């Protein structure tokens, strides 16, 4: 998408323009203060001591040597930690219960559920003293046999339970019989390893108690859930908890729920009655923050000689833990992407003695799409058809799983534009048929897909007599340009220059917002913001009629009315207001769910080059064309999608958490040994957005957060097959698998 539009003049609409992010200067000059940088006098530093067994009990814990280290203030264990309430089990009617990362009541139990679970907390005058002392805590355990090896446990998986947000499977016709009778078919098994969160800012908390009031500065994706959760655990009113989260150095799902670090920092601050800070070490992120578990998937597809699908079977096994964890819906892409007369989707879970899994970079579709989109490519080759033509032939008219109407679906247009831009017609379909010197060249495609949802947000909008506008909403800016796009939306809705709008966010003292998860935040906040702007304009119009200023500026109207400013509110954070909001939200959610299939789509095109001797895979070129409704900001949107594609390249080629199958210990908890892509691994990535408004959404926008990474690993695996003739169905796609 072009980023060279002429600069907007005063009063020109700004929605759709590549506006620089409003927080850019603060971030690039270092003026931005992150959660581990907030200054407090008398600040103490905390660090965690991890368990070294995966299941059992603590029999004794010796903190004498640790306590003797100079500068140590206290060492907290299950024997002396202050009161902490247990978390509430998951309840789909109360989103705040999503907020519990685990069901473990840290430092209030001697039971161990995974290797790395915090067993002690050291608080000291300096970070160095805290780390030194932590290494001196001696813990003895009584170990029990544990289930930590996914390959060995896979057979013990049980059918995944459905709930009102996450379906567990689907059945349409007799898919097994249709598969058996199909003249062309593939029946494939895919495996994906565990992956870990590695945001550039490790999870960080600064916690301060003032009597019974708690303030936490925390790198969170959900201010509201965190506040509710801390109130529950520390037995205070939510109004007594303030969460401040102005800048967050990346979320990716790892900061969506509440993990041990945040809770224990607040506990430490209460124990010593001083401000306490904890920034997790990279290793502690692996120990205490859940991420993506290993999975295996079977995709069996049948087609007629004409290439039309006759059967789609997708069954999966993923893992959970004995202490909670949000299960993924791995078959999600198979519910929606292809027209098929029969369908069988089943998900299974196996309980393991590992940290509970957590959302990560597109839960469900992230790895679900690897299996489906690889299998579709294989079937296209079996049929003898170009993989794009094959997809277009099987493009559904309505949502395959339930026949609902699509709110909008421009996937064929995305493929057509991408093919032209990428030069797909230059590809010769025969595997191994394209070379460039010692490089085997391959081109692959795959579909990107993520369902679109909205949640509830409260906002206020205030217009002042000088024409300035303040939007207040406690949403989270995790690095994507969230405040910038809301300012653009408000500017256009009120007809004021972009520079006049200030957006206040990232603080629970503001009206509460949805979490920055599930690609919901921007559309959710925009929905309330637009409602607020309409309400404000209506009040301004009636003021103008009363004071004879119709046709003049908003400022004139306020001046004539003798008002310094005018503010409207959407939603309310009173107890009743919150319940009303929840009911309103669920009513709307269920109505929308019944009526429309709403999603973001995309077509990925990639070129890989593979060294003929070493098997090294380089991604040489990328084009992604996306359909997610209206584009608010071409710069932040393309940047976010590009980041998503890079995350997908990481998952495809390098990322793998290595778990010791004997004891459940993560063996590579560092950026040195967990292979994220680096600059040299990333080619030119061209991102294009169709910018077709969704007719069912205010302003036509849905969500873009998570569609980017979906399908990326499949596009690469399909390109690798095209280059080499080899099908790799086990990630990561490392060179040893190609030799
Ligand atoms: Mo996202 S992985 O729902 O934060």
Image (cartoon, rainbow, N blue to C red):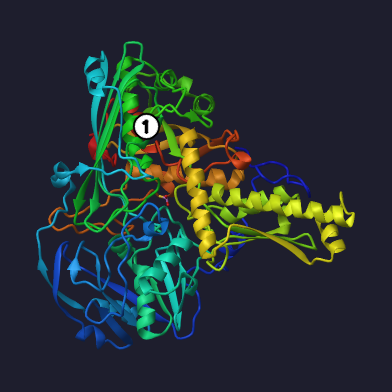
Q: Cβ of disc 1 within 8 Å of ligand 1?
A: no
Pick the quarter of the image with the C terminus.
top left
Would residue 172 appear left or right of 647 to someone viewing this image?
Answer: left
In terms of depth relative to the viewer, which is nearer, 281 or 340? 340
- In the image, is 80 to the left or to the right of 457? left
The one of 603 and 580 positioned closer to us in this rendering? 580
Q: Give the residue at the far top of this rendering.
A: 305
Residue drawn 33% across and 31% down? 372
Residue 730: % across, % down? 25, 38
Q: Residue furthest right?
A: 548
Height in image: 578 above or below 294?
below
Decide: is 506 above or below 266.
above
For residue 710, which quarter of the picture? Answer: top left
Image position, residue 545 (x, y; %): 86, 52
Residue for point 50% across, 24% down? 412
User: Who is closer to the viewer here, 31 or 436?
Assistant: 31
Report if residue 732 is visible in the image.
yes
Q: Which quarter of the figure is the N terminus placed in?
A: top right
Instruction: Give the quadrant of residue 335.
Output: top left
Provide the residue designation for mark 1: 335
Observer able to see residue 613: no
Q: Residues within 10 Å of mark 1 (few under 14, many from 20)?
A: many
- Picture coordinates of residue 301, whole percent (x, y): 29, 23
Secondary element type, mark 1:
helix
How many numbered marks have been drawn onto this rendered protein structure?
1
Q: Position of residue 430 (x, y in %)?
A: 34, 18
Q: Of 236 and 398, which appears nearest the observer?
A: 236
Q: Residue at x 70, y 49 (%)?
A: 534
């Amino acid at each position: 998408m072009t980023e060279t539009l002429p600069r907007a003049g005063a009063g020109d609409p700004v929605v759709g323009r590549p506006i620089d992010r409003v927080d850019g200067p603060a971030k690039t000059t270092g003026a931005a203060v992150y959660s581990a940088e907030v200054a407090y006098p008398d600040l103490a530093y905390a660090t965690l001591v991890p368990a070294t067994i995966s299941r059992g009990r603590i029999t004794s814990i010796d903190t004498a040597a640790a306590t003797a280290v100079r500068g140590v203030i206290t060492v907290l264990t299950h024997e002396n930690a202050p009161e902490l309430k247990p978390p509430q089990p998951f309840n789909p009617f109360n989103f705040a219960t999503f907020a519990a990362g685990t069901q473990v009541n840290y430092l209030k139990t001697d039971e161990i559920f995974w290797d790395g679970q915090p067993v002690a907390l050291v608080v000291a005058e300096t970070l160095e003293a805290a780390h030194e002392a932590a290494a001196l805590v001696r813990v003895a355990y009584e170990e029990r046999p544990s289930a930590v090896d996914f390959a060995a446990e896979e057979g013990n998986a049980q059918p995944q339970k459905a709930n009102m947000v996450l379906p567990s499977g689907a059945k349409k016709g007799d898919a097994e019989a249709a598969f058996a009778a199909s003249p062309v078919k593939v029946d494939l098994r895919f495996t994906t390893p565990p992956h870990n969160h590695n945001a550039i800012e490790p999870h960080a908390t600064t916690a301060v108690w003032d009597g019974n009031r708690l303030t936490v500065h925390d790198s969170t994706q959900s201010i509201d859930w965190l506040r509710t959760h801390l109130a529950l655990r520390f037995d205070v009113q939510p109004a007594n908890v303030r969460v401040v989260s102005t800048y967050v150095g990346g979320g990716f799902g790892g900061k969506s729920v509440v993990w041990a670090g945040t809770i224990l920092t607040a506990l430490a601050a209460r124990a010593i009655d001083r401000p306490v800070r904890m920034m997790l070490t990279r290793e502690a992120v692996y120990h205490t923050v859940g991420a993506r578990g290993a999975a295996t998937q079977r995709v069996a597809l049948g087609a007629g000689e004409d290439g039309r699908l006759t059967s789609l079977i997708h069954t999966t096994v993923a893992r959970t833990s004995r202490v909670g964890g949000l299960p993924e819906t791995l078959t999600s892409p198979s519910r929606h992407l292809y027209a098929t007369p029969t369908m069988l989707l089943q998900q299974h879970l196996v309980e393991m003695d590992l940290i509970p899994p957590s959302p990560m970079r597109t839960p469900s579709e992230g790895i679900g799409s690897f299996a489906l989109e690889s299998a579709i490519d294989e079937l296209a080759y079996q049929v003898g058809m170009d993989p794009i033509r094959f997809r277009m032939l099987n493009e559904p008219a309505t949502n395959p799983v339930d026949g609902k109407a699509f709110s909008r679906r421009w996937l064929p247009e995305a493929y057509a534009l991408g093919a032209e831009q990428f030069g797909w017609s230059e590809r010769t379909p025969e595997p191994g048929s394209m070379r460039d010197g010692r490089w085997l060249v391959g081109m692959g495609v795959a579909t990107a897909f993520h369902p679109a949802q909205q949640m509830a947000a409260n906002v206020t909008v205030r217009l002042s007599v000088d024409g300035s506008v303040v939007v207040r909403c406690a949403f989270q800016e995790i690095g994507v340009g969230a405040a910038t796009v809301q300012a653009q939306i408000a500017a256009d809705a009120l007809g004021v220059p972009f520079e006049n709008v200030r957006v206040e966010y990232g603080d629970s003292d503001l009206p509460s917002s949805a979490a920055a998860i599930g690609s919901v935040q921007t559309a959710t906040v925009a929905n309330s913001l637009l409602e607020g702007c309409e309400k404000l304009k209506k009040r301004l119009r009636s003021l103008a009629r009363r004071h004879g200023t119709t046709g003049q500026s908003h400022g004139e109207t306020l001046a004539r009315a003798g008002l310094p400013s005018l503010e409207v509110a959407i939603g309310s954070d009173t107890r009743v207001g919150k319940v009303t909001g929840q009911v309103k939200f669920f009513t709307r959610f269920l109505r929308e769910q019944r009526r429309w299939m709403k999603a973001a789509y995309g077509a990925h095109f990639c070129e890989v080059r593979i060294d003929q001797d070493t098997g090294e895979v380089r991604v040489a070129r990328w084009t992604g064309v996306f359909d997610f409704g209206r584009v608010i900001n071409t710069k932040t949107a393309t940047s976010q999608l590009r980041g998503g594609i890079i995350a997908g390249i990481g998952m495809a080629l390098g990322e793998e958490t290595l778990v010791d199958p004997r004891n459940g210990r993560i063996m590579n908890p560092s950026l040195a040994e967990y292979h994220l892509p680096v600059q040299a691994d990333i080619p030119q990535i061209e991102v294009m957005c169709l910018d077709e408004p969704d007719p069912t959404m205010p302003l036509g926008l849905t969500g873009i957060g998570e569609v980017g990474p979906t399908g990326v690993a499949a596009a690469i695996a399909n390109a690798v097959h095209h280059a080499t003739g080899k099908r790799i169905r086990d990630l990561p796609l490392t060179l040893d698998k190609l030799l």
